[in-house]
Structure formats: C-alpha cells, structure tokens
C-alpha cells in the first residue's frame, strides 16, 4: 500500500514542507516513489509513515532535528540490515538524547542493552532493582535468619518448637 504526501501529513502531524525537506535531506525518503521533477508524486510505504511519526514524536519530545539526524546516522551505521531504523528499532528519549534499547528476545528485559545514540554509542546499564531485592532477601535469610525475621515482623522459632507446633496443628492439638 502506498500513501500520498497529503495523507502522510495528516496521519503523522508533519507538515508537507517538513516532509519535502526530510525527503531532500535524506532523513526519511518515500520508498515507493520519490519525487522526479515538477508534478511528480511522492509515495510513502507504511514503514515510511512509522519512521516519520517517530521523527515527529522525537521532535515533539524536545529532540532537535540535528539530533534526530545524528541518531538516524548512528542507527544506519550500526544496523545496516534494518530498512527503516526509525520504524523498526526501540527508541526511548528523555528529551535531551535518544536511547536505543536492544530487542533480543533471548535475553531477559534487565539484561538488554541500552545505547545512547547521540553519545557515540555509549552503553548504559539497567539496574534490576526487583532482582537485586530478591537476591538480598535470600542472602539475608541464609546468613542472618534472625534479621530476615525482623524485617518481616516475625521472630524465628527454634527448630524443635516450630516442628512441634506444626505437628500439633495438624492433629488439632495446641502445643505448649
């Protein structure tokens, strides 16, 4: 399916002037049919529309056009096999830079890479707080069971007393 520039402008929020400029500068070019002189029509694919919508979103979130171009240059250099990087890769922004989140389905979310596309590919690391908390609880329970009981609000029972209470509870008898 091919989309004309008017429809792309309405769908993405980019002005026609922006689309023409982005085509001329190579930011996002129509992949179905490019302009070939006066009166010719630009025809965009669905991936082109997604890429334009991503660029518009980045701009709206505070990323300058120059930064969007630098980000796209980085993505094209490091992912040459991806036809339309702005439409296919997972990007996140904080309003001043654009991060690429690796999409490796074989890895856990906390083990995926985050790359700053505007800082030359500087690698960032996720800190999986949930996993760290679970590991800390296990270690505390292993090395300091009394501290683990205090943190949960119950004191540990001596082994014999707790076993007696469990057996007595099963029989319906109260242990003393």
Image: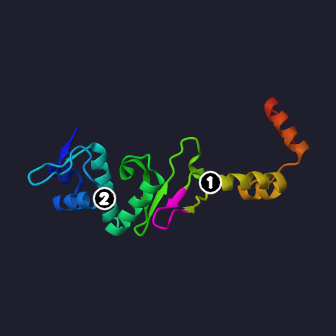
Report which quarter residue 3 is drawn in: top left
Secondary structure, mark 2, is loop
Q: Residue 1, position in %: x, y? A: 23, 37
Q: Nearer the viewer, mark 1 or mark 2?
A: 2
Q: From what the image shows, is residue 32 above or below residue 140? A: above
Report which quarter residue 47 is drawn in: top left
Q: Residue 126, position in %: x, y? A: 58, 58
Q: Identify the residue shown where x is 16% and y is 58%.
A: 16
Question: Position of 164 compared to 116: left or right?
Answer: right
Q: Badge 2, how many Cα within 10 Å: few under 14, some, many 20+? A: some
Sequence order check, earlier mark of 1 and 2: 2
Q: Identify the residue shown where x is 19% and y is 59%.
A: 20
Q: Identify the residue shown where x is 56% and y is 61%.
A: 123
Q: In the rendered image, is residue 153 in sight?
A: no
Is 119 within the magenta? yes
Query: How far apart are the alpha carbons under marks 1 and 2?
Result: 40 Å
Question: Position of 97 compared to 51: left or right?
Answer: right
Residue with the most extreme front position: 37
Q: Identify the residue shown where x is 25% and y is 60%.
A: 22
- In the image, which residues are magenta? 114-122
Residue with the most extreme right position: 160
Secondary structure, mark 1, is helix
Is 176 within the magenta? no
Residue 130: numbered disc: 1
Q: Please state which of residues 157 and 137 is positioned toward the viewer in this rendering.
A: 137
Q: Residue 106, position in %: x, y? A: 58, 41
* Residue bearing mark 2: 27
């Amino acid at each position: 399916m091919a989309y004309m520039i008017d429809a792309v402008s309405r769908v993405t929020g980019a002005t026609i002037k922006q689309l023409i400029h982005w085509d001329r500068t190579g930011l996002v070019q129509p992949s179905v049919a490019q302009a070939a002189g006066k009166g010719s029509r630009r025809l965009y694919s669905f991936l082109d529309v997604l890429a334009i919508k991503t660029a518009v979103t980045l701009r709206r979130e505070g990323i300058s056009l120059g930064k969007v171009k630098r980000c796209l240059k980085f993505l094209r250099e490091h992912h040459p096999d991806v036809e339309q990087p702005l439409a296919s890769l997972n990007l996140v922004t904080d309003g001043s830079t654009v991060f690429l989140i690796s999409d490796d389905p074989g890895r856990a979310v906390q083990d995926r890479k985050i790359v700053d596309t505007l800082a030359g590919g500087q690698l960032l690391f996720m800190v999986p707080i949930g996993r760290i908390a679970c590991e800390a609880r296990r270690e505390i329970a292993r090395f300091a069971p009394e501290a683990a009981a205090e943190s949960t609000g119950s004191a540990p029972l001596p082994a014999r007393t707790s076993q007696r209470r469990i057996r007595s509870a099963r029989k319906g008898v109260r242990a003393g």
